[in-house]
Amino acid sequence: MPNPPRVRAAALTASVVLLSALLAGCGDDSEDQDLTAQKLSWKDCPAPSPAEGGGDAPSPLPGGDEWQCATMKAPLDWDRPKGDTIDLALIRAKSSGDESRRIGSLVFNFGGPGGSGVTTLPAFGADYAKLRTRYDLVSFDPRGVGRSAGVECLNDGQLDAYFQQDATPDDAIERTELLDNTKEFNAACEDNSEKVLPHVHTADAARDMDLMRQVLGDDKLHYFGISYGTELGGVYAHLFPKRVGRAVFDAVVDPTQDSEQGSLSQAKGFQLALDNFARDCTSKTEDCPIGDSVQDVGNRIAELLKDLDGKPIPGIGSRQLTQTAATGGIAQALYSKDYWEFLTEGLEQAYDGNGQMLMFLSDAMNGRNQNGEYSNISAANVAINCADEKPRYTVDQVQRKLPEFRAASALFGDYLAWSTLSCADWAVPGAAARPDVSAPGSAPILVVGNTGDPATPYEGARKMVTALGKGVGVELTYKGQGHGAYDSKNSCVRAAVDGYLLDGRVPAAGTVCS
């Protein structure tokens, strides 16, 4: 993503459609509506829409139960709760256990911002089978995402060109091109999504979740937030501390950082993850095919990226692997240790002049499927980030900060520094420099940090615990690799999280799993 893999300003851009098409699902409702009294009509799930990533309808659950989908109406503008509404797309797997032991619904947000929960929850459904014994598993497309009044910007062909641009400019001409392309993208978002853009703040999504809690029939919101989902959960806890049930934050966003600080932190995190990947490869008994030492692996990647800046290599179809696409592909592979073998293969290919695997990884980062269709994760990501984040950075500011970013990471520093331009000329003012997640009076929230996390570095977990307030955040450390901890399948992490969500057992603060 040439406005790289930041949690708070990551992917970019989507497709040009008429405003009327974007706002399908917005209604002009009567002043006496009571949205808390609405009844959801659960039906078998359709195939995901292109904006949600496309593909097939979710496969049946173990035992043959079907995933169910519904839409929930929410106010377009929470300052006018009885005005126009939007439809929010929901998905659930009903509890598989004894109804007498059912706790309620467990609501998931998997991050981004901009990720479709309707497509992501079924993809990971097997990982949450134990939680399903006492909960209905529920997720949703947050406002601005997928089928929930999804933000639209550029079309698929325009996005192909957009993601080929040079996201790490070396001279004045390239800097002007990057800024102009960013502004053109942002203008397309305004042209196609003008009515929705002012209403995709994280605080709006938090209010949607409280409405969802009521419509689902729960007194408390039981919640599992991952990555950006931890920020959304923190904002919810701040707004509704007495309504927090059992909640887990995994892969934790640092709520004390502004967007520039978050990007700098990610530069350090991705560099750490790359070094860990290289150390793993070079420490094995057989020869590592991409270098003889951690330093050698880094040097060879740096040389590859330098060469690609001047001369891209064949990628997929007519698209070439550029320096930007290769950097994005490398970053994508660092999100999970399970992807390290693909990174090794991709680098081997690239050194031989074949960019196919790294391009495939880059496409995954940007939400592009094999049919050439893009989900709207990039467009939604920028829209939500820019609605939330007050700072607006300039080319001069980025240039002044480049030495600090390069010191944090020779490979990812420029890439992440220039990503801070993503809100240039954005149509909607940002709400604040940082989210307020203070939640005095909330039930305990289990906060899980991973020491090897590239995208939400480990230090953010402790910052979240402190910001939530005394007696709220309970820190759990996982000494592992990749983005997040629960889906690593580490038995210690699973036991702690499951014990809290299923039985209400809060682990001792400072528990360490390895």
Image: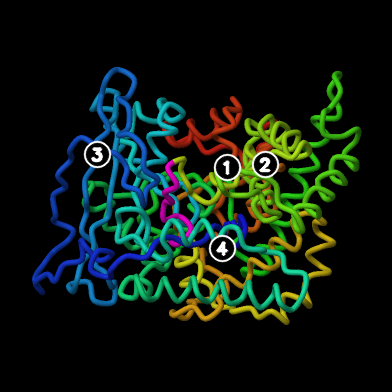
- Give neighbour class at mark 4: few <14, some 14-19, many 20+ (Cα, 10 Å): many
Mark 1 or 3, closer to the camera: 1
Q: How is the image coloured?
A: rainbow
- Which mark, residue 9? 4
Mark 2 or 3, closer to the camera: 2
Mark 4: which amino acid? Ala
Under tag 3, what secondary structure?
A: loop
The percent coordinates of residue 309 (x first, y second) are 75, 58
In front here: 141 or 508?
141
| Residue linked to disc 1 | 316
Q: Earlier in the sequence, mark 2 or mark 3?
A: 3
In front here: 358 or 507?
358
| Residue linked to disc 3 | 46
Is 273 drawn above or below residue 86 in the view shown? above
Assess whether mark 1 and mark 4 are in contact (beta carbons under 8 angstroms). Answer: no
Quadrant showing the N terminus? bottom right
The percent coordinates of residue 375 (x first, y second) are 42, 51
Quadrant showing the C terminus? top right
Magenta stretch in the rendered image: 371-380
Under tag 1, what secondary structure?
A: strand
Mark 2: which amino acid? Gly
Assess whether mark 1 and mark 2 are in contact (beta carbons under 8 angstroms). Answer: yes
Whether residue 458 is visible to the viewer of this picture, yes or no, is: no
| Residue linked to disc 2 | 355
Q: CA distance from mark 4 to mark 3?
A: 30 Å
Mark 4 or 1, closer to the camera: 1
Q: CA distance from mark 2 to mark 4?
A: 26 Å
